[in-house]
Image (cartoon, rainbow, N blue to C red):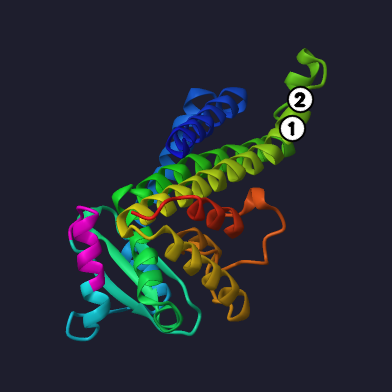
């Protein structure tokens, strides 16, 4: 169901892009905005592992340095039918984790020092399985596509704003009864909001899928549910200094408590995620 929802939401982003492009940019405007957004997001997608790992000072670890963690990731990767990803540890007490990399053969699983301290082995297996599912489902690629479409929409909206400011809609006003400039202004305001809401909804759908996939790989949905409960409470007690642009990558939102609306949240409510996991049968 969430896979279908992701497809529909990506379709909605594409439709919104074509709609606003047709309204004030035409086919040429859509193509230009899409190319610019694609160029901006391509680098982020291709170098995502290096960028985000550097941002959080993640340190690659070998099997000798972290034998238990390394063995766990290898065992779960085999269960998920994935190549062994690189393993990194992020310094700090805040418990959290994420996966990055442009494909299965360039993937990294990163965990904080804090998560290694507070989770049991079974709970950590659930978290690692969740992250491996993100890799298997190519969620970095899906997120990059969504970001590209949303970015193109924002660029077109900015074009509309400048067009309205400099009065390019006056001719439309005279011919169409005054809807030209008003329409441009409304689109410039509403289109980026709509694009952001859809992009965040895609992110939330992928989290539900990663939870379900993680529970299947580890065979321990209750342990993953317990881990999410611990991580959610701990992330509020020990906040992580996270960049909002990377918040969607973490297993629990590092910006918990700062978002005013669930519509603009990168993650579903933890309570709902836990309830879904607890409704699953252990394998």
* The one of 121 and 98 positioned closer to us in this rendering: 121
Per the image, label 1 sits on a secondary structure element best described as: loop
Q: Are marks 1 and 2 in contact (CB under 8 Å)?
A: yes
Residue that carries the numbered disc 2 in the rendered image: 170
* The one of 201 and 126 positioned closer to us in this rendering: 126
Q: Residue at x 39, y 67 (%)?
A: 52
Q: Is residue 189 left or right of residue 14?
A: right
On residue 206, which mark appears?
Answer: none
Q: Residue furthest right?
A: 177
Q: Can you say whether 33 is above or below 123 in the image?
A: above
Q: Position of residue 237 (x, y in %)?
A: 62, 80
Q: Residues within 10 Å of mark 1 (few under 14, many from 20)?
A: few
Residue that carries the numbered disc 1 in the rendered image: 167
Mark-to-mark CA distance, 1 and 2: 6 Å
Q: Position of residue 6 (x, y in %)?
A: 46, 38
Q: Quadrant of residue 256?
A: bottom right
Q: Position of residue 282 (x, y in %)?
A: 38, 55
Q: Position of residue 203 (x, y in %)?
A: 50, 49
């Amino acid at each position: 169901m969430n896979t279908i929802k992701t497809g529909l939401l990506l379709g909605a982003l594409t439709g919104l892009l074509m709609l606003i492009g047709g309204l004030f940019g035409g086919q040429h405007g859509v193509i230009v905005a899409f190319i610019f957004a694609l160029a901006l997001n391509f680098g982020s997608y291709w170098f995502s592992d290096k960028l985000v790992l550097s941002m959080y000072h993640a340190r690659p670890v070998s099997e000798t340095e972290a034998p238990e963690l390394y063995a766990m990731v290898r065992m779960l990767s085999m269960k998920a039918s994935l190549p062994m990803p690189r393993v990194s540890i992020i310094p700090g007490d805040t418990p959290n984790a994420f996966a990055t990399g442009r494909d299965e053969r360039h993937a990294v699983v990163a965990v904080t020092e804090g998560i290694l301290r507070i989770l049991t082995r079974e709970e950590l297996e659930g978290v690692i399985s969740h992250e491996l599912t993100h890799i298997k489902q190519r969620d970095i690629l899906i997120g990059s596509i969504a970001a590209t479409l949303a970015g193109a929409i924002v660029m077109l909206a900015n074009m509309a704003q400048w067009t309205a400011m400099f009065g390019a809609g006056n001719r439309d006003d005279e011919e169409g009864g005054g809807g030209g400039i008003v329409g441009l202004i409304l689109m410039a305001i509403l289109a980026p909001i709509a694009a952001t809401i859809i992009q965040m909804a895609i992110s939330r759908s992928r989290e539900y899928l990663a939870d379900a996939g993680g529970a299947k790989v580890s065979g321990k949905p209750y342990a993953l549910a317990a881990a999410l409960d611990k991580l959610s409470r701990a992330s509020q007690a020990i906040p992580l200094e996270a960049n909002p642009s990377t918040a969607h990558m973490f297993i629990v939102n590092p910006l918990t408590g700062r978002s005013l609306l669930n519509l603009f949240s990168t993650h579903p409510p933890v309570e709902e995620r836990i309830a879904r996991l607890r409704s699953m049968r252990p394998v």
